[in-house]
Amino acid sequence: MLIPENLLRMDNQSNCLLKLRVHPGARRSSISGILGDALKIELQAPPVDGKANTALIKFLADTLKIRRNMVELKSGECSRDKVVKISGMTPEQIISILKVES
């Protein structure tokens, strides 16, 4: 799967902002493709009491092989449409890893 580069942008502090469309309550956590202008991620965790948001951060950190504190939910806490901030990586590094993992 090719990850369009428009899913990622840089903020003022050279962090990457990644647009996501999250579907909680799936059989297993996985990257399942592109939906519109966002990366579609299915999460096994239910959308209850922030469990899906916690699982999302863990899933992205594990997938990108970075520490969890390097992934931060910037917007969409109560929405399926989310933006996460990833620090310490370039867009090219993120795209490269997401291509391999998907």
Image (spheres, rainbow, N blue to C red):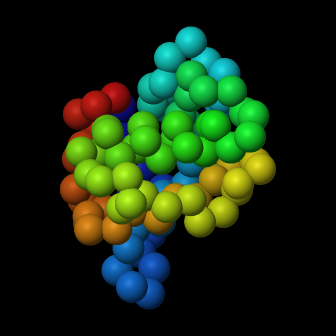
Q: Name the one closer to the observer, 51 or 82.
A: 51
Q: Name the one closer to the observer, 56 or 48.
A: 48
Answer with left or right where residue 94 lies relative to residue 58: left
Picture coordinates of residue 39, whole percent (x, y)? 51, 43
Q: Is residue 16 above or below residue 67?
A: below
Residue 91 placement: quadrant: bottom left
- Residue name at image x 38 percent, y 60 percent: 69
Q: Name the one closer to the observer, 22 or 65.
A: 65
Picture coordinates of residue 23, whole percent (x, y)? 65, 31
Q: Residue furthest top?
A: 27
- Residue name at image x 61 percent, y 18 percent: 26
Residue 51 visible in the shown view? yes
Answer with left or right where residue 31 lies relative to residue 100: right
Q: How many marks?
A: 0
Q: Name the one closer to the observer, 60 or 94.
A: 60
Q: Is residue 100 above or below residue 38?
A: above
Picture coordinates of residue 30, whole percent (x, y)? 45, 26
Q: Is residue 34 above or below residue 4?
A: above
Q: Residue furthest front?
A: 49
Picture coordinates of residue 57, whole percent (x, y)? 47, 47
Answer with left or right where residue 20 lies relative to residue 15: right
Q: Is residue 5 above or below residue 22?
A: below
Q: Quadrant of the C terminus?
A: top left
Residue 10 placement: quadrant: bottom left
- Residue name at image x 55 percent, y 43 percent: 54
Answer with left or right where residue 89 lies relative to residue 84: left
Q: Quadrant of the N terminus?
A: top left
Residue 94 visible in the shown view? no
